[in-house]
Structures are given as C-alpha cells and as structure tokens.
Amino acid sequence: MSFWGFAAAADGPWIACTSPSTTRVYVYDVRDGSMAASVETGIMPSVAWVPRSGEQPALLVVGSTQGIQAFRIREKDAAKADAAGR
C-alpha cells in the first residue's frame, strides 16, 4: 500500500497516514514501526493532530467525505509492557 498523506504528532510517538486506495487512516508508532491504530473513514481523508492538553492525550482529527471525526490516541503503558516481557 502506498501512502499520500501524513501528519506527525508533535507530542507523541505517532504518525497518521492516509492512502488514496483505501478509506482507512493508519496510525503508526514511529519508535518501532508497529501499527497503533486504524479507523475507517470516508473518501479522501485528511489528518491533523491537536497536541495533548493537561492530562488528555493527543487528539487525531480526520476530515473526509463523511465529515469530521476526532480520536484520542493513548500511549501504551510501558510499565505493563515491560512487566509482561514485551
């Protein structure tokens, strides 16, 4: 799959990617390249990030033919992952 739209989160380890061949938005963790999330949107999605506010995590804003949607992206709990041996 090829991506044509990108938006990097200023205060998190994520990059949101869009593709002309799908109506999904993909969010990748730039530290290890793993997919952190994906969401079905409308045709021709555009993405932007709103920085975290206080205790609230970063907000991914997606605009498409279906309107505007917003998603909170939470970082994995590193302590739990370390304790589980991941």
Image (cartoon, rainbow, N blue to C red):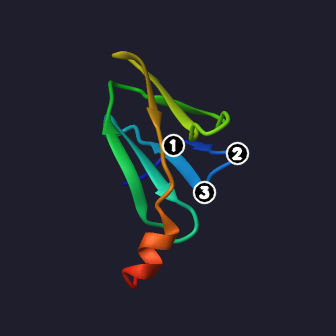
Q: Amino acid at mark 2?
A: Ala
Mark 3 in CB contact with mark 2 (< 8 angstroms): no
Q: Earlier in the sequence, mark 3 or mark 1?
A: 1
Q: In the rendering, at what x and y percent does residue 74 appear?
A: 48, 48
Q: In the rendering, at what x and y percent does residue 34 appear?
A: 43, 65
Residue highlighted by disc 3: 13
> Which secondary structure lies at badge 2?
loop
Tag of residue 4: 1
Q: Amino acid at mark 3?
A: Pro
Q: Amino acid at mark 1?
A: Trp
Question: Which quadrant of the figure contains the N terminus?
Answer: bottom left
> Which secondary structure lies at badge 3?
loop
Q: CA distance from mark 3 to mark 1?
A: 20 Å
Front one among 23 and 75: 75
Say few, some or many: other residues with alpha carbon within 10 Å of mark 1 (under 14 / 14 to 19 / 20 or more).
few
Q: In the rendering, at what x and y percent does residue 38 appear?
A: 35, 46
**Image position of 31 (left or right of 18):** right
User: Is residue 4 positioned above or below 86 on the image?
Assistant: above
Q: Earlier in the sequence, mark 2 or mark 1?
A: 1
Residue highlighted by disc 2: 10
Which marked residue is nearer to the observer: mark 2 or mark 1? 2
